[in-house]
Image (spheres, rainbow, N blue to C red):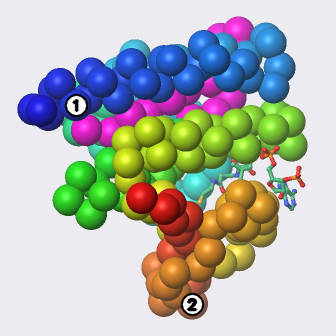
């Protein structure tokens, strides 16, 4: 299978998930990101992450338009309320969560868990061995969410988020 065929298939798999698994609240709508979503992504990212860690315009445009990433966005009316960016590594048979965030006014409504359930379902469907990510050790909300879903710490990432700001690599492994 060539890369563009792979990506088309992944897009279809994600769309099929949206139809079969409704979001926790019906006024939210889920779609795959296009470059038209970049300004909204930058806006939400600015409020969720330290500017040194944020992807920024050029990276988002590359991830959406050129890379093999699948980026999912959730809107409430015209407001972007959440996003998830997934990067498949075919060689390592792993699916990486490159970014996930929920708008502060819409947290604790199950949106983060819904996005993670989507990532888990796609990782299984694509026969990945692992779903993995990196998270700031001080990010209690995110770490709790990952632990609750069965992720385990697989490595300590010293100074990953800045001096004395350590991270954890977390991983959810699947049986073949
Ligand atoms: C982490 C984040 C995505 C969670 O999104 P969310 O939509 O609020 O998550 P959910 O409502 O699905 O909650 C899932 C679990 O997260 C944990 N959690 C959520 N908010 C929490 C809080 N304030 N304190 C502790 N744990 C919390 C809980 O384990 C919760 O499960 P429970 O409701 O059964 O207790 C969101 O807080 C966020 O966007 N944070 C800023 C960006 C970020 O840190 N991204 C992750 C980078 S690795």
Q: Is residue 86 magenta?
A: no
Where is residue 146? Give x, y as percent: 68, 61
Viewer-closest of 126 and 115: 126
Question: Tag 2 or tag 1, which sits nearer the N-term?
Answer: 1
x 27%, y 21%: residue: 8
Look at the image and give the residue range highlighted in magenta: 68-83
Q: Is residue 73 magenta?
A: yes
- Count the numbered circles shown: 2
Q: Secondary structure at mark 2?
A: loop
Q: In the image as oriented, which residue stretches furthest toward the right?
A: 108
Q: Is residue 25 left or right of residue 124?
A: right
x 64%, y 33%: residue: 82
x 17%, y 24%: residue: 5
Where is residue 105? Give x, y as percent: 83, 35
In the figure, 140 relative to 108: above or below? below
Can you say which quadrant of the picture contains the N terminus?
top left
Where is residue 137? Give x, y as percent: 65, 78
Task: Give the main secondary structure, helix, strand or loop, of the magenta stretch.
Answer: strand
In the figure, 65 relative to 99: above or below? above
Residue on which disc 1 sits: 6
x 33%, y 39%: residue: 69
Q: Secondary structure at mark 1?
A: helix
Q: Quadrant of residue 44?
A: top right
In the figure, 26 relative to 42: above or below? above
Q: Which mark is residue 94?
A: none
Is residue 53 at least partly visible in the picture? no
Q: In the image as oriented, which residue stretches furthest toward the left?
A: 2
Q: Is residue 75 left or right of residue 65?
A: right
Q: Is residue 8 left or right of residue 19?
A: left
Q: Are marks 1 and 2 in contact (CB under 8 Å)?
A: no
Residue on which disc 2 sits: 164
Is residue 140 at least partly visible in the picture? yes
């Amino acid at each position: 299978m060539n890369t563009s065929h792979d990506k088309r298939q992944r897009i279809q798999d994600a769309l099929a998930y949206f139809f079969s698994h409704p979001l926790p609240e019906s006024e939210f709508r889920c779609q795959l990101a296009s470059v038209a979503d970049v300004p909204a992504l930058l806006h939400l990212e600015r409020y969720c992450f330290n500017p040194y860690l944020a992807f920024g315009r050029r990276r988002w445009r590359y991830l959406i338009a050129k890379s093999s990433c699948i980026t999912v966005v959730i809107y409430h009316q015209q407001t972007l309320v959440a996003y998830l960016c997934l990067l498949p590594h075919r060689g390592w048979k792993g699916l990486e969560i490159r970014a996930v965030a929920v708008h502060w006014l819409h947290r604790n409504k199950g949106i983060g868990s819904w996005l993670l359930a989507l990532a888990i379902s796609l990782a299984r469907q694509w026969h990945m061995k692992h779903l993995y990510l990196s998270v700031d050790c001080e990010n209690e909300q995110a770490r709790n969410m990952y632990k609750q879903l069965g992720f385990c710490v697989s490595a300590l990432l010293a100074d990953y988020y800045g001096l004395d700001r350590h991270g954890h690599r977390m991983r959810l492994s699947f049986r073949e």
